Each structure stands twice: as C-alpha cells, then as structure tokens.
Amino acid sequence: MTSRLKQHVLDVADHLFYAEGVRAVGIDRIIEESGIAKASFYRFFSSKDVLIAEWIVMRDQAWRAWLEESVTMLSPQVQGRPLAVFDALYARFRKPSFRGCAFINTIIELSNLAHPAAQAARHHKEQVLAMLERYLKDAGYTAPSLACDFMLLIDGALVTALREHTPDAALRAQRMAAMLLQSA
C-alpha cells in the first residue's frame, strides 16, 4: 500500500510539474490533489527537492522506455532506427499535452546544476545520447560526433516544437539528421 500511495503522489506530481513547472507547483497543491495527509507526504519525500529529483528519475525511465519501444515499432530494421527517433518525437509533439522537454525545463527552472534533479535530468540526456550511439552503431555509422549532433537536433526540435507550437520541428530535424547520415 505504501509504495502504491507514493507512486500516486509521483503521478500527481508528474502531471502538475510537466504541465506547470517545478517551481510553480507547491507541495500543498500536490498534497491536496493527491488526497494524502501531509505527514504521509513527508514520510515519502523529506522535501520538495527530493520529490522533484524522484520525479525526474521516474520520468527518465518512462521516457526512455517509450522511445525505445516507439523506435523499435517504427523501424523493425536497425538501419532505420536513427531517423525513426524523429518520427517518434513527431508523434509525441502532436499530443495536446506536449509542453516541451521535462528535463530541459527542469534544468532551466532550477538553475542550480548541482541540484539532484538537475543532475538526474543531465543523466537522462546522457542515457539518451548512449541510446543514439547504439542506434547509430547498429545501423553502421561510426563517426564519433554523430550521436552528439543527433542529440543537438533532438534538443533543438523539443524546444522549437514548443516555441512554434507545431510538431514540424521533428521533421525538419529529421531532414538535417538524414543529411548528416549521408555525409558520414
């Protein structure tokens, strides 16, 4: 029961933090919307900073699992997976709930790179980079900076899709990624 209740609080925080930002949402609101007692909240999370960090770790695991599943479904052949990443992003950007990258947003909002949640968000980006390196290697691409270039395109597409309020940034980034692959 305890782990289910803690997960419920994390799910409520996930919805609120992603929709409104980690600084805009207070602990009292999370407690109220999750319907738990304040003492229970503090038994699970000693502070809001601890909650934010645990939320980022949870979101990281879910996001990477989503990307892996989506890319594999979109491209059963490993050769197509590097570019399929952008097809997956395009589908995600089309969702009405899309509000950019939770990891970039959190790093910006916290502004303290030593904050545990900022470190967890940076770890997420490192793990996505490792995933891109694997996709590229499996597809036969060995240029050392290619995964970093793809990461730059992905992060740029995430921010641009939010700024422009259109999913097309993923397709534009995909065209640039295809040019990178052609020149590799």
Image (cartoon, grey):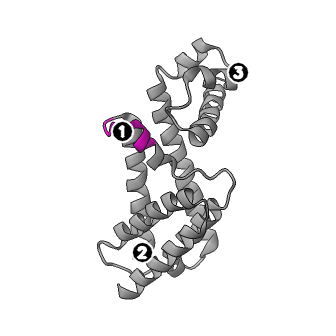
Q: Is residue 131 visible?
A: yes
Question: Which of the 4 image quadrants contains residue 73?
Answer: bottom right
Q: Residue 45 at x, y = what percent?
A: 50, 23
Local secondary structure at mark 3 = loop
- Residue 138 at x, y percent in the picture: 44, 76
Q: Are marks 3 and 1 in contact (CB under 8 Å)?
A: no
Disc number for residue 111:
1
> Which quadrant is home to the C terminus?
bottom left
Q: Is residue 1 left or right of residue 99?
A: right
Region rendered in magenta: 106-114
Q: Residue at x 58, y 19 (%)?
A: 41
User: Which residue reaches farthest bottom?
Assistant: 182
Element assignment for label 2: helix
Q: Residue drawn 33% across and 36% down?
A: 112
Q: Residue 25 is drawn in which quadrant? A: top right
Q: Is residue 79 left or right of residue 91?
A: left
Pointers 3 and 2 in contact (C-beta within 8 Å): no
Gap between marks 3 and 2, in whole Å?
46 Å
In the displayed structure, does residue 146 sit left or right of residue 28? Answer: left
* Residue density around tag 2, few if under 14, some if 14–19, many if 20 or more, within 10 Å: many
Q: Dot 1 lies on which element?
A: loop
Q: Is residue 107 magenta?
A: yes
Magenta stretch holds residue 4: no
Residue occupied by mark 3:
35
Residue type (three-letter) at the residue carrying disc 3: Gly
Q: Could you say which is closer to the camera, residue 113 or residue 42?
A: 113
**Disc 2 designates what residue?**
136
